[in-house]
Image (cartoon, rainbow, N blue to C red):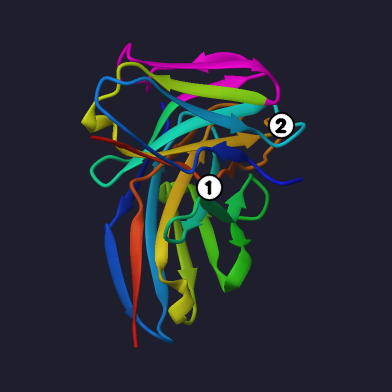
Amino acid sequence: AQSVTQLGSHVSVSEGALVLLRCNYSSSVPPYLFWYVQYPNQGLQLLLKYTSAATLVKGINDFEAEFKKSETSFHLTKPSAHMSDAAEYFCAVSERDDKIIFGKGTRLHILP
Amino acid sequence: DAGVIQSPRHEVTEMGQEVTLRCKPISGHNSLFWYRQTMMRGLELLIYFNNNVPIDDSGMPEDRFSAKMPNASFSTLKIQPSEPRDSAVYFCASSSRRGNTEAFFGQGTRLTVV
């Protein structure tokens, strides 16, 4: 069965610094991988997704993630953090036409 | 499309009462998911449907929980009887599972059982 591990339940970065949120997955077949963002009192919104095309995926708000099969990783990065990036971020995995399983989330704090 | 619509947005009920949460998926989507979000356990998949048929309900915590999808445009999650530990935010999401599309989430229902 597929699963997701997000390292670090809380990450703090300074405004303007690099954002790196880590995600490792487990899947028995080539997976689909997703990053979602959740702002307070809202549902989840898709940031980006990997669907077996390019391994470097670009999403909204300058976020990107790289699929590394050898490391079973799909880490999320952004070159320069903005105050508005403060939110909770979820990595998710899906085994093709199947359920979507989420990690426990990483809360990103932006320091002024 | 208005997106995934959940009702109510907030529900406060007394322990032992029946609670019904409702979801209208995006038109044309053929998969529907119910998730529960808590601080302790994160975002848990409770059950998902494909073409109105329950495919995997292994995440449903107890027999007190039940879900139905009588047609492609409506689903319910029922808790009977409710308990304080059921307090959480419940999300419904839908997707078009032909291909590689993501799940689209509703705004959630915040349930408080007192």
Taking B21 as reference, is A20 above or below it?
below
Q: For mark 1, give the secondary structure.
A: loop
- Give the CA separation, mark 2 to mark 1: 17 Å
Would residue B110 be visible to someone looking at this image?
yes
User: Which sits in the foreground, A17 or B81?
Assistant: B81
How packed mark 2 is, by other alpha carbons closer than 10 Å (few <14, some 14-19, many 20 or more), is some
Residue B72 within the magenta-colored segment of the rendering: yes
| Span shown in magenta | B47-73
Taking A19 as reference, is A7 above or below it?
above
- Check disc 1 and give the amino acid type: Gln
How packed mark 1 is, by other alpha carbons closer than 10 Å (few <14, some 14-19, many 20 or more), is many
Q: Quadrant of residue B87?
A: top left
- Check disc 2 and give the amino acid type: His
Question: Residue B29: which numbered mark, if any?
Answer: 2
Q: How many marks?
A: 2
Name the residue located 56 percent from the left edge and 43 percent from the top edge.
Answer: B106
Q: Position of residue B16 (x, y in %)?
A: 26, 20
Disc 1 sits on a residue from what chain?
Answer: B
Q: Nearer the viewer, mark 2 or mark 1?
A: 1
Taking B80 as reference, is A16 above or below it?
below
User: Which sits in the foreground, B26 or A70?
Assistant: B26
Residue B59 within the magenta-colored segment of the rendering: yes
Name the residue located 49 percent from the left edge and 58 percent from the top edge.
Answer: A37
Q: Is residue B109 left or right of residue B17?
A: right
Q: Position of residue B107 (x, y in %)?
A: 53, 47
Q: What is the quadrant of the C terminus of chain A in the image?
A: bottom left
User: Which sits in the foreground, A37 or A24?
Assistant: A37
Q: What is the quadrant of the N terminus of chain A in the image?
A: top left
Name the residue located 41 percent from the left edge and 73 percent from the top edge.
Answer: A19
Question: Residue B107: which numbered mark, if any?
Answer: 1
